[in-house]
Image (cartoon, rainbow, N blue to C red):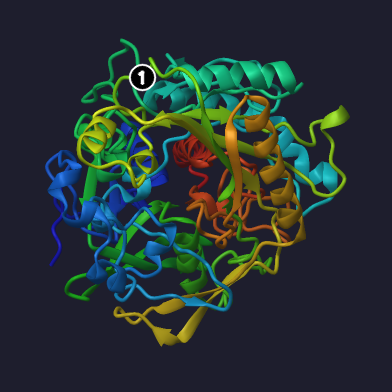
Amino acid sequence: MSKFYYNEEQESYDAIVVGTGISGGWAAKELCEAGLKTLVLERGRMVKHIDDYVTANKDPWDFPNGGEATKEIIEQQPKQNRTGYTTNQASHMWFVNDKEHPYNETKRFDWMRGYHLGGRSLQWGRQSYRWSDIDFNANKKEGISIDWPVRYKDIAPWYSKVETYIGVSGEALNLPQLPDSEFLPMMELNCVEQHFREKVAENFDGRVVTAGRTAHLTGTKQFDGRSKCQFRNRCIRGCPFGAYFSSLSSTLPAAEATGNMTLRPDSIVHEIMYDPDTKKATGVKVIDANTKETFEFKAKVIFLCASAIASTSILMQSKSDTFPNGMGNESDQLGRNIMDHHLGVGASGKFDGFEDNYYKGRKPSGIYIPRFRNLGGTSERSEYKRGFGYQGGASRGNWEDTVAELAYGKDLKDAVLKPGGWQFGMTGFGEVLPYEENRFTLDYDKLDDWGLPTVTFDAEFKENEWKMREDMKQSAVDMLTKAGLKDVTPYDNPGALGLGIHEMGTARMGRDRKTSVLNGNNQLHDVSNVYVTDGSFMTSANCVNPSLTYMAFTARAADHAVKELKKGNI
């Protein structure tokens, strides 16, 4: 039987949190700090901060074949391997074995998962951006999907709360499409990135180049149990310094410190129990991942934070006479409106100059170009709606320079002892619109090892995304060319939905239970003591990394739940 951590098992709890990733960690922290006895359930294995980051201090030469994924890894993780980077030898252990955790594809969907304590907060890209009212108003303005039930003013204070706690490095710009955060000092641009920034400002109105806004500690401000970024750029392995925010380095230790958290890993939640008399959830049903024993845990309030697909799957499986099609599914919106970001399109080039300049360490972030399309005036485009941003950066050390046929003997030795020329690459992140027909369903004819239905995806990019990609590619070429780069080469490798690892939208929030699953406080319309605060609740996708928004909405929902419990409303 799996072990309970920090406290012994109780008969019932004030709150249950399902999942320990970005959202689950925040829910645990906020609920525990408010005094609620909270059971935190994680379907994956226990992981201890620092101790279990087994590859964090290994160098490239410590891995055979340069660390590339082995044949065995690829055979076990064929879908996780689609990213091209997650399953190398340094990080493959943080992603699931696809044979043990199968899913089905009517259309290709890259479902990247991390089943362990901390979830994907250990491997996320750390880019942290606020939404603006441009984003919260877009659906209503354009008549697409349904309106968000919140606006920027509702979430702004929670952004500030989260940013102050996690630490976000960046630069204030005062842009209407990208509100500023509570910033730590930004990571400085290197000389070529600074040159690019100046040339873009000189040649393109309305385009701004800044440093990526990242959840990395910089400067002198002190954070409990964490130290500032060491510029190693080994983040995906787990950071022994706690330099980037994760549940393991930050929110879960804070929850543990209250004495109110009981943690149980290896616990697969598959159903929420419901009392038709009180019209409230009473607890959750759990399968032990190792022994396959079944358990029930009871609580006054439940937070689903298992990820967009997993949380919605739990709701779908929570059937009763009241909810024959899944809990809270009167709208038939569970599983629909799958969104992600489309990426893998941009350009790269080489830069002559600054040969006497280099940089210190390996910066874990580069440049960011905020959205500059469809914001009014000359930025408007008729061929597609919404917009995109870019991430990218400049570096030295191009090994192509050492492969020339004449590079042998003394010439080769000299070549490898000198840094290569400067290269600059940038990739776009575009918004995907919410489409009802982009969905997943549960297949009860294909069960997993725990007797639960497997997920079947049927979702794809559509015309708006394809038209946007043309602009994403050409705009990247234009900016690099104007900045004086040579051999500028565009690329477009679309992959499929899921590849951005930003899946969202499967239990959207809205103003009407007939068209949405959740209200503006992240509560199920029909079951007030169930909150969903991971990517499931998203009503549109924006073009920025969504994790900061998940955290802010989770903190806000936890505050709401605590107040409603005290009032006796839930």
Find residue 526 and report its image quarter: bottom right
Task: Label 1, secondary structure: give it.
Answer: loop
Name which residue type carries label 1.
Tyr
Within 10 Å of disc 1 (Cα), the crowding (few <14, some 14-19, many 20+) is: some
User: 109 above or below 366?
Assistant: below
Side of 163 where 497 appears, left or right: right
What residue is shown at x 67% (from left), y 48% (from top)?
540
Q: Position of residue 403 (x, y in %)?
A: 34, 45
Report the front residue among 252 and 103. 103
Q: Position of residue 43 (x, y in %)?
A: 29, 61
Q: Position of residue 78 (x, y in %)?
A: 37, 70
User: 409 above or below 512?
Assistant: above
User: 242 above or below 218?
Assistant: below
Side of 421 where 514 appears, left or right: right
What residue is shown at x 58% (from left), y 53% (from top)?
340
Mark 1, residue position: 358
What residue is shown at x 35% (from left), y 80% (from top)?
448
Residue at the farthest top position: 220
Residue 57 visible? The answer is yes
